[in-house]
Image (tube, helix red, strand yellow):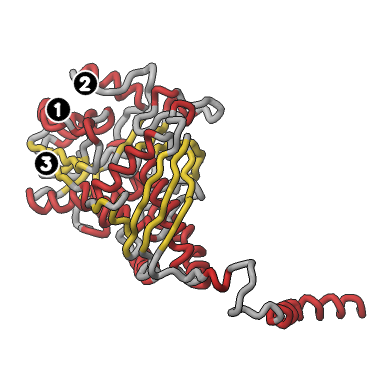
Amino acid sequence: MSEEIKKIVLAYSGGLDTSVILKWLKETYECPVVAYAADLGQAEEIDGITEKALNTGADDVIIDDLKEEFVRDFVWPALRANAVYESTYLLGTSLARPLIARGQVEVARRVGADAVSHGATGKGNDQVRFELAYMALDPGLKIIAPWRTWDFRGREDLMDYARSKGIPVPVTKKKPYSSDRNLLHISFEGGILEDTWAEPPEDMFVLSVSPEKAPDRPTYVEIEFKEGNPVSVNGETMSPANLLAHLNDLGGRNGVGRVDMVENRYVGMKSRGVYETPGGTILRVAHIAMESITVDREVMHIRDGLIPRYSDIIYNGYWFSPEREMLQALIDETQKNVKGVVRIKLYKGNCIVVGRMSRSSLYDADFATFEEDEVYRQKDAEGFIRLNGLRLKIAKLLEREA
């Protein structure tokens, strides 16, 4: 290669793409390659990853357990913002990439690497997320994006190359969709899912049962919040990662959290994604319910107007940006009184709020009641309506005169 590289840290998952990339980097750059894996809750996917990377040619393998950090420092801030991309996607992959990239950069500094690499394609969002994070955290690192430079045209070529090099891969030509998993979600895209009319096969799903196979009796769950963060489930205090994992189990068993959408990628094309986000779905519904009785109306409306922009920032890869930090500070200011308990009913794919209570509640039954009360004068509403309708009345009168 024209550019001399001394050592590379590769974001390694053990899947088809990064397994091929690991071997390709060794052959192409003829330098040490460190396989870096961040454990964000991939479950059994992380098993055997060290042996596989070493057998594929890695000079060293580093695995970081970042599950608690992922949920506490990335998922919870997005939850406090009720972040959702295009009204549907709860940003599971988008939130994971900046943390993986930060881990890579830290390892690169520790082992003296001068380059980092990733397995994102030249068509997707992840290339942007990884590389913007690298640039924000250590602009001196060289970035290698194999999908933008090698001669492979698609995953069929990668599978052929992997077989020729003796690399075992968990993908077959019969079922060639790709997936990405962490504690917040699992995503599926590509292959058979590229037909937007075709229903995803039931055997594809990992975290949830279908609503048809969910229990015939509802599951009730109570979630406690403090300053916008969930802290306990059914009275049991849990760490962030354990709490999310527990709700993934409850939600998955009740068929909650499946999403099938066609989204707009940052690079300009539409893409179909299928997601399972059981715990995240429950928490967003519960958090919105908690805010409904603890956040001032105007504060809530201003914040709600910023949710699409905040979500776009994360989706597009700008986690380590001044605009995300600015919005996060504003959002977190709104969360100081978001504390209390929300009761949720889970039933056959539905996540239904059935109760909420808080010592910081702004809801006052004495004012809201439709029964007789002594705190609200209904006649006051007449002047309120007259003044608010005055501009409409004047406009119509002038229109008639004209």
Is the C terminus in the top left, top right, bottom left or bottom right quadrant? bottom right
Instruction: Look at the numbered discs 1 and 2 and tell me whether their residues touch, using CB distance below 8 Å.
Output: yes
Rendered residue at 46%/28% (across/down): 193
Q: Check disc 3: other Cα within 10 Å, few if <14, some if 14-19, many if 20+.
A: some
Q: Amino acid at mark 3?
A: Ile
Q: Please indicate, yes or no, whether residue 320 appears anywhere in the rendered image.
A: yes
Decide which of tag 3 and tag 1 comes sooner along the chain: 1
Rendered residue at 38%/65% (across/down): 338
Q: In the structure shown, which secondary structural element does the residue marked by tag 1 occupy?
A: helix
Decide: is 243 above or below 349: below
Instruction: Look at the numbered discs 3 and 2 and tell me whether their residues touch, using CB distance below 8 Å.
Output: no
Q: CA distance from mark 3 to mark 1?
A: 13 Å
Decide which of tag 3 and tag 2 comes sooner along the chain: 3
Q: Amino acid at mark 1?
A: Lys
Q: Which residue is mark 1?
A: 52
Q: Which residue is mark 2?
A: 168
Rendered residue at 47%/71% (across/down): 362
Q: CA distance from mark 1 to mark 2?
A: 9 Å
Q: In the structure shown, which secondary structural element does the residue marked by tag 2 occupy?
A: loop
From the viewer's side, name the closer residue of 65 and 373.
373
Q: Please indicate, yes or no, whether residue 148 appears anywhere in the rendered image.
A: no
Rendered residue at 40%/44% (across/down): 220
Where residue 389 sits, quadrant-wise, is: bottom right
Q: In the structure shown, which secondary structural element does the residue marked by tag 3 occupy?
A: strand
From the viewer's side, name the closer residue of 267 and 283.
283
Residue 310 position, x and y percent, is 42, 60
Q: Which residue is mark 3?
A: 62
Is the N terminus in the top left, top right, bottom left or bottom right quadrant? top left
Outermost residue, right side: 401
Q: CA distance from mark 3 to mark 2?
A: 20 Å
